[in-house]
Image (cartoon, grey):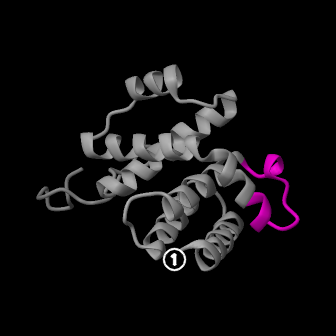
Amino acid sequence: MRGPEGGGEVDRPDAGESRPTRAGPRRQARELALQLLYELDVRGESTPGAVAEDFWNRQVAPAEARSYAEVLVRGTKLYQPKIDELITRFAEHWDLDRMAVVDRNILRAGIFELLWGAQVPPKVVINEALEIAKKFSTDESTRFVNGLLDRVRRELCP
């Protein structure tokens, strides 16, 4: 879109346009991982397999983002029984199956990254999960995600 003088581009989308992503490859990877984990969860799939293949056929993502998203998805699914046990333990008065699918999968990916993921500082993992929750969920969910991931960090991270 042209600026008022017909000059350079204005960094503001028109109504109906999607805002271009300015997220770095790790944020983009985390968002893609959430989307794939969501799809796997809704379909009741325990392994990525064909669902992941179909997902990546629909996505345009830089190789670095895709690679890290795949690590997050594979790791989250590998450790999902333990992760779900931790969510149930730390989410007092919440039934895992009654949580919003988005929130449940933000928590799963966040816990995987906190406990088994790459050398990312825990505060960065939590902050990234919160930014993704703000984008894909509600304010209340963001507070819930923050509280649960922070509790996991305090009690289980070295």
For the residue carrying disc 1, how many other residues have a C-alpha within 10 Å: few (<14), some (14-19), or many (20+)? few
In front of the other: 98 or 83:
83
- Examine the rendered structure and indicate whether residue 53 appears above or below residue 91: above
- Examine the rendered structure and indicate whether residue 91 appears above or below residue 48: below
The residue that appears at 39% across and 67% down in the rendered structure is 120
Residue that protrudes farthest toward the left in the picture: 7
In front of the other: 105 or 154:
154
- Examine the rendered structure and indicate whether residue 52 appears above or below residue 68: above
Residue that protrudes farthest toward the right in the picture: 93
- Secondary structure state at the residue bearing disc 1: loop
The residue that appears at 11% across and 58% down in the rendered structure is 7
Q: Which residue is mark 1?
A: 158
Q: Does the magenta segment cover residue 97?
A: yes
Q: Does the magenta segment cover residue 8?
A: no
Magenta highlight range: 87-100
Residue 53, horizontal then vertical, whole percent: 44, 23
Residue 149, located in which quarter of the rendered image? bottom right
The residue that appears at 41% across and 44% down in the rendered structure is 71
Residue 106, horizontal then vertical, whole percent: 59, 55
Residue that protrudes farthest toward the front in the picture: 158
The residue that appears at 30% across and 53% down in the rendered structure is 25
Q: Is residue 93 left or right of residue 4?
A: right
> Which amino acid, mark 1?
Pro
- Examine the rendered structure and indicate whether residue 126 appears above or below residue 28: below
